[in-house]
Image (cartoon, helix red, strand yellow):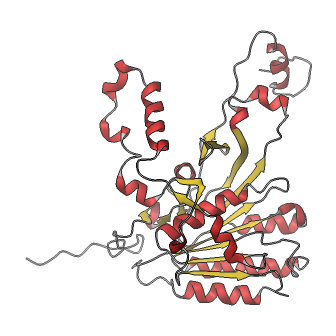
Amino acid sequence: MATTKARVSSFSRNVSTVTSQNPGLKHGPNGTMLLSSGIPDLDKILGGGFPLGSLVMVMEDEEAPHHMLLLRNFMSQGLVQKQPLLYASASKDPKRFLGTLPSPASPKGDKSSDLSHEKDIRIAWQYKKYFGEPQLNLNTNGSQQDYCNDFDLRKPLDRHFYSGNNVDCVSIKDSPNLSVLQDRCAGFLAKLSRNEGNISSAGRIAIQSFCSPQCKYSNEEWHMLSFIRSLKGMVQSSNAVVVVTFPPSLLSPSCSLRLQHMADTLLSVRAIPDEDKELAKLLTGYQDMIGLINIHKAARLNTQVPVILEATTFSIKLHKRRFLVLECLNQAPVDGSSGSSYGTSGGCSGSSKVGTLDF
């Protein structure tokens, strides 16, 4: 019996030739393929992960290096799945940074069991019959763990993951311009070009502190914008994802806005002051937060439909001081003594006088 060929039109991408044996990839909407960010909660927020051929920009916080948490998990996820990696930073020896990458947690780790136990506690026993077993065991499924792992920030990654030939490190500290980095990125992405939808492997590029003052080209803003524009054009025709972190406070407002506009996915992280009493009254679990992450833009390729997220600001927490967790912000309950102050601060007009339109 002859095999039937999948029907392909000019409006849909042929995904039948995409290899499904690669655990580091999964199908996304509109014929896209998704790559995990290394953080399970961030993948859920973004709809599955980063699309292949997209540029991810992360705005750093000048007070705390929280962007390093996102970058480490992103790099570790690729190394665990044996994906090619290109890492560039302003340090003299970028290879030393690979020794700080976290290691994936074991399948029998405490995090999965604790999270499932907490979920069982939240659900009353008389309502358990309405929830099926596949939904409760979704996080313990083997394929789900292969796509995105939970990384233990206290345990370093084994050396054999980054000692092979699939890791390339570039130092941009002493480079007078970005031509060397551009050539290395072009050669790296040329090996991952798309061929009729056949994706045998996917790669990752991580550039840390792109506009760092240690770089000699930090004052040439137009040259940096040209590099990012060229890098975005190269990654669009490849099976790779590029993550670039940059400090917006060291750039002019116009240059920072242009970098944000060129990003397919735009994130920002910032630290939380330790003694912010007003914020501690507004948010529950404030003492467990180490920072905040904002989703300014989520990538959607092959479509013109905008993305509307349920929330754009999430808290960054460390579960058992080991696992990175993102949670929605919840307002703390208001007691009787402080009810008037919350009412005035939460008014529509923002003034201390109570009007007819305040609520």
Left or right? Give the position of 7 relative to 50.
Answer: left
- Residue at 51%, 72% (x, y): give it: 161
Front residue of 301 and 177: 177
Front residue of 348 and 272: 272
Q: Residue furthest left?
A: 1
User: Measured along the vertical axis of the image, is residue 246 above or below residue 166?
Assistant: above
Left or right? Give the position of 199 relative to 262.
Answer: left
Please provide percent x and percent y for residue 210.
78, 72
- Residue at 44%, 60% (x, y): give it: 147
Left or right? Give the position of 53 relative to 211.
Answer: left
**Whether residue 302 can be seen here:** no
Front residue of 315 and 26: 315
Q: In which quarter of the image is the N terminus?
A: bottom left
Please provide percent x and percent y for residue 94.
71, 76
Left or right? Give the position of 145 relative to 269.
Answer: left
User: Measured along the vertical axis of the image, is residue 199 above or below residue 67?
Assistant: below
Front residue of 130 and 289: 289
Please provide percent x and percent y for residue 6.
26, 73
Please provide percent x and percent y for residue 275.
85, 34
- Residue at 41%, 46% (x, y): give it: 139
